[in-house]
Amino acid sequence: MKYAKALTHRPVPLAIIGGGAAGLFAAAIASSRGLGCLVLERKARVGSKLLMTANGRCNFTKDIPPERMLADIGEPVASFVGPAIRSCPPSMIAGGFKARGLGIRRMPDGRLFPASGKAADVVHVFGDQLRDSTVPLLTNCPVTGVQPVKNGFILATRHFTLWARNVLVATGGASFPKTGSVGDGQEFARRMGHRVVPLRAGLVGCETDDRAVRAMAGARFENGASAALVIDGREVFRARGEVEIEQWGVSGAAVYNCTRHAVRQGIEAFDLRIETPEGNWTVKRPTMRPLKEAIVTMGGVSLAEVNPETMESRIVPGLYFAGEVLDVDGPTGGYNITIAFATANLAVRNCMQRSGPDGRSDTFMV
Ligand SMILES: Cc1cc2nc3c(=O)[nH]c(=O)nc-3n(C[C@H](O)[C@H](O)[C@H](O)COP(=O)(O)OP(=O)(O)OC[C@H]3O[C@@H](n4cnc5c(N)ncnc54)[C@H](O)[C@@H]3O)c2cc1C
């Protein structure tokens, strides 16, 4: 790594790479607990993906007990994110937003949205907190390398290097790359000795040549709709929820949850049985849409080498991961943002314990 001019004379207690769901939550927790931190974000603004969630409405969690949430997430992810979600359950996430003035709308199934219906209000909560606690936010600032050194890490950017005691990699998955998540964090992890599970599309639509299906493009079934994975005529998984017909095939929450299940189970060929109050039909051997269109990235930093009680690397002390950069994913319905928030919270809490009094923000100067 070529070192440009250093930005800090003393190490930043915590450098957070990525200003998405996980990175912003981490910065909010760190600043509220007095841990000196800064956020480095590739794009010109933070929270680009959060802004597009749930069609711009942001379903940020689901008001259900943690154990039910973990059961819905399923194994092997549930065991890994269990400690994080139990220590930062949906009730705590909702309470935190409420305390910071966000009005919340609860859907009958428990999904929580900002009452305004605007994802921007969720991002503003973070923006306000970081402004009030003067957390440095470096936008237009892609990190290009992370190098462990004797006393922490050197982070490289195009214009300067930064010395950090601890690093949280919160760079997201690799879907919707225009939001800034392009797989950098997985590459940093790989270079530091971590195994990375190949990245694949999870929660994605299904494409079909079936003209009868495509002819219904624009149709949307919400109540009473479901989709099922069928293998050799036998139904192996069914998901209830919205089904939408697109020019290229089928999408919507029920279809997305079917594709996630198929990928997790290694099912490559299947039929999709769609049931709606207006009729049932089977989509024969559909193909999944590409990773860049997926709601969530499956694969990422292998869970075997990250401590689920702390989110710290088992290979490089002081290196933490949170959110979709890890090989974690959940179904639709607020689970993925909850995972990002909860893993970020756990990482920061443990980073604070590790930093001790040295981590206090008053020792942190840029
Ligand atoms: C269309 C869509 C709708 C969705 N709807 C929902 C929903 O309603 N509810 C839900 O729970 N989940 C939803 N999700 C999933 C959810 O948005 C993600 O799981 C969540 O944002 C992951 O958070 P993250 O912080 O890990 O990654 P991200 O939110 O993607 O943030 C990663 C950040 O890191 C930055 N970054 C990347 N590389 C670098 C680098 N080298 N240097 C500096 N910065 C970098 C990126 O620019 C980005 O800002 C949706 C996803 C999509 C695509």
Image (tube, rainbow, N blue to C red):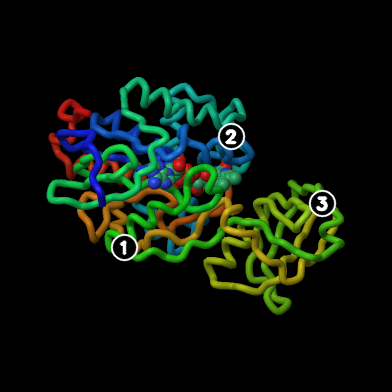
State which tag comes first along the sequence, 1 or 3. Answer: 1
Where residue 361 appears, as percent x and y from the top left, is 21, 29
**Contact (Cβ within 8 Å) of mark 1 with mark 3:** no
Query: 36 and 221: which one is in front?
Result: 36
Query: Residue 189 occupies which quadrant of the picture?
Result: bottom left
Q: Which residue lies under the disc numbered 1?
A: 194
Where residue 173 appears, as percent x and y from the top left, is 47, 52
In the picture as drawn, the residue positioned furthest to the bottom comes out as: 232
Query: 271 and 130: which one is in front?
Result: 130
Q: Which residue lies under the disc numbered 3?
A: 217
Q: Which residue lies under the disc numbered 2?
A: 106
Amino acid type, callout 3? Ala
Amino acid type, callout 1? His
State which tag comes first along the sequence, 1 or 2. Answer: 2
Amino acid type, callout 2? Arg
Label 1 Cα crowd, 10 Å radius (few <14 / some 14-19 / many 20+): many
